[in-house]
Image (tube, rainbow, N blue to C red):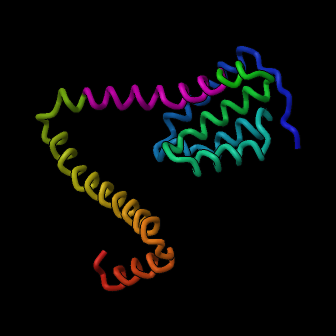
Amino acid sequence: MSAPQIVLSWSDWLSLFGHYLMLSLMSVGGAISTTSEMHRYLVEQHHWLTQAQFNNAIALAQAAPGPNVLFVALMGWQVGMNAGSTGAAFLGVAVTMLGILIPSTVLTYFAAQWGHRNRDLRAVRAFKQGMAPVVIALLLSTSWILGSAMLIWRTKLHLLWILAGGALLGWLQLV
């Protein structure tokens, strides 16, 4: 199936930007948590992407190393390419990425500033103390995954043995 040739006006680009601004504020679990709304908007409502293009953008970004928010850039790129030029593709990347990143970045910045200004409040101190174990646990879980990957890569140990070892540790209630 060939890619659709679409015509986008400046109001369409502005609408796309505004939609991604709104999605940014809804994406509590990361940008990936808003994919159903992106699909509705890009594929079903405006037909700026095909189903295959949408799926490929997510699959490629998930398979590639780095942040999974890159699927947003790939969708913007595809919208621009469907509009007919590489220049439009770069505009699509800028519109979607800035739209998804600006609100959450600004919100995080102001929340951090507020927290720093009010660091002596009991609630702020309690929040920071409560988050410390969560951050440590996330770091440990990431190191566990990376360590397992290194073990598989360097020793050529079969993945099923790693999984069996993990199951055994879980059964013994050691993890």
Pick the residue in front: 95 or 63.
Answer: 63
Residue 80 image offset from top left, x and y in percent: 73, 26
Magenta span: 91-113
Task: Choose top left, top right, bottom left or bottom right for residue 81.
Answer: top right
Q: Tell me the quarter of the image containing the N terminus.
A: top right
Magenta span includes 92: yes
Quarter placement of the C terminus: bottom left
> In the image, is 149 to the left or to the right of 69?
left
Q: Residue at x 20, y 44 (%)?
A: 128
Relative to 19, say whether 10 is above or below.
above
Asked whether, in this view, residue 150 is left or right of residue 173, the answer is: right
Q: Nearer the viewer, residue 167 or 14?
A: 167
Residue 121 percent coordinates (x, y): 13, 36
- Residue 73 highlighted magenta (yes or no): no
* Total count of labels: 0
Principal secondary structure, stretch drawn in magenta: helix
- At horizontal 66% and vertical 31% (from top left) the residue drawn is 76
Quick one: which residue is furthest to the right in this view? 1
